[in-house]
Image (spheres, rainbow, N blue to C red):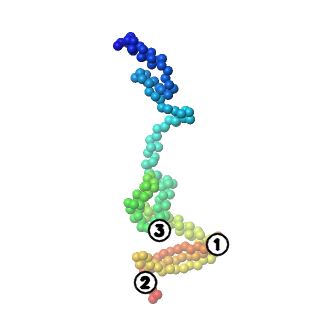
């Protein structure tokens, strides 16, 4: 069967002459027709082409926060507040469960060392809190103080000094000003 054979000529004429349905796209390289994907009237427009993600965008989800950035500072302040408010040991930040929890919450956050919390974060929180308390105490006229001798869970004795006052909105306030180790027993005899 050569190019001039009747079968080849008639097949070629048949493919060119036969009208194709609207949902069929001819494949010229194979000489056969393949149905095109069905489209209904509501989806006549093309879907927007997907853009390729840039390298910066691809790696932005794993690049850690800048240690001077607001997000890193906010999380570090929250951890510091947690340590101070609930009096948990500072070595909590080295426990695997605590580290895993923070990495699950925000993988871009790098938890500082225990030394950072002991020498930087907690002293900064103390200084800010002390300044805020001093500012509030400067504005009061009348106050009273109380002392309390108490024992810790480990039976170490402590003495606390607390100030009580009514603020400008007539709310009763109390602030512990100092807690110190009290070396003597605090029995009724002493």
Residue sitting farthest toward the left: 1
- Residue 86 is tagged as 3
As drawn, 31 above or below 105? above
Of badges 2 and 3, the one in the foreground is: 3
- Mark 1 Cα shell of 10 Å, populated few (<14), some (14-19), many (≥20): few
Q: Residue at x 43, y 61 (%)?
A: 116
Q: Residue at x 45, y 85 (%)?
A: 187
**Comes first in the chain, label 2 or label 3:** 3
Q: Nearer the viewer, residue 122 or 40?
A: 40
Residue that label 1 marks = 170
- Between the C-alphas of marks 1 and 3, the distance is 28 Å
CB-based contact (under 8 Å), mark 2 and mark 3:
no
The percent coordinates of residue 44 (x first, y second) are 55, 32
Residue that label 2 marks = 185
The percent coordinates of residue 178 (x first, y second) are 50, 74
The percent coordinates of residue 69 (x first, y second) are 49, 53
Q: Quadrant of residue 136?
A: bottom right
Kindly state the secondary structure of the residue where label 3 is placed. Answer: loop
As drawn, 10 above or below 109? above
Of badges 2 and 1, the one in the foreground is: 1
**Comes first in the chain, label 1 or label 3:** 3
- Quarter of the image with the C terminus is bottom left
**Comes first in the chain, label 2 or label 1:** 1
Q: Quadrant of residue 142?
A: bottom right
CB-based contact (under 8 Å), mark 1 and mark 3:
no
Kindly state the secondary structure of the residue where label 1 is placed. Answer: loop
Kindly state the secondary structure of the residue where label 2 is placed. Answer: loop
């Amino acid at each position: 069967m050569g190019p001039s054979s009747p079968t080849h000529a008639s097949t070629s004429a048949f493919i060119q002459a036969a009208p194709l349905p609207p949902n069929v796209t001819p494949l010229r390289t194979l000489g056969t027709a393949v149905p095109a994907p069905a489209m209904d009237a509501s989806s006549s427009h093309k879907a927007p082409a997907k853009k390729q993600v840039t390298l910066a965008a691809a790696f932005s989800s794993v690049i850690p926060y800048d240690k001077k950035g607001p997000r890193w500072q906010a999380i570090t302040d929250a951890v510091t507040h947690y340590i101070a408010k609930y009096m948990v040991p500072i070595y909590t930040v080295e426990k695997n469960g605590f580290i895993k929890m923070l990495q699950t919450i925000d993988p871009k956050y790098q938890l500082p060392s225990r030394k950072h919390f002991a020498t930087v974060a907690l002293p900064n929180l103390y200084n800010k809190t002390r300044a805020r308390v001093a500012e509030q105490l400067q504005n009061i006229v009348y106050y009273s103080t109380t002392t309390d001798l108490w024992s810790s869970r480990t039976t170490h004795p402590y003495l606390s000094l607390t100030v009580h006052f009514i603020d400008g909105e007539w709310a009763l306030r109390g602030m512990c000003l100092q807690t110190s180790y009290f070396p003597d027993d605090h029995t009724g005899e002493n």
